[in-house]
Amino acid sequence: MTVGCRDGEDGRPKAALMLSDAEPAELRCGTRAASSTQAYGSRCKIVLASAGGATNTQEAQRLGMPTVGKWRKRFVENRLAGLADEPRRGGHP
């Protein structure tokens, strides 16, 4: 599945989002799994909606999350691994 090149008519160009045959099921699982964090589940929802044709603006408004473009881009660049939290700087408490 491929999604267009612009986020709405006036939006910035964005990379095409294509899902492999297995990724939709993995993303749906990420939205429901008890072991998933709420943040990871939201990121999976963002990617699924983007693959369905929703623009970044539409998803940001629907989910109330201004970081839709960030997660969509990280998925395009790093697939499912891009949706995981990156290590934070500093020591652990």
Image (spheres, helix red, strand yellow):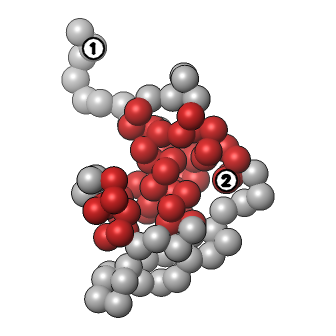
Q: Is residue 30 above or below residue 6?
A: above
**Callout 2, which amino acid?**
Pro
Q: Residue visible at 47% across and 39% down? A: 41
Query: Are discs 2 and 1 less than 8 Å apart at CB?
Result: no
Taking the view exactly as shown, the residue that stands out farthest to the front is 62
Q: Nearer the viewer, mark 2 or mark 1?
A: 2
Asked whether the viewer can see residue 85, the reply is no
Quadrant of the rendering where the N terminus is positioned? bottom right
Question: In the image, is 6 to the left or to the right of 64?
Answer: right
Image position, residue 90 (x, y; %): 22, 23
Question: In the image, is 3 to the left or to the right of 65?
Answer: right
Q: Residue visible at 57% across and 66% down? A: 51
Answer with the quarter of the image where residue 38 lies: top left
Quadrant of the rendering where the C terminus is positioned? top left
What element does badge 2 sit on? helix
Q: Which mark is residue 92?
A: 1
Question: Total label count?
Answer: 2
Image position, residue 92 (x, y; %): 27, 14
What element does badge 1 sit on? loop
Asked whether the viewer can see residue 45, the reply is yes
**Callout 1, which amino acid?**
His
Dot 1 crowding, Cα within 10 Å, few <14, some 14–19, many 20+: few
Q: Residue visible at 42% across and 44% down? A: 42
Q: Which mark is residue 80?
A: none
- Distance between mark 2 and mark 1 Cα atoms: 34 Å
Image position, residue 44 (x, y; %): 51, 47
Judging by the rendered image, the residue that carries numbered circle 2 is 24
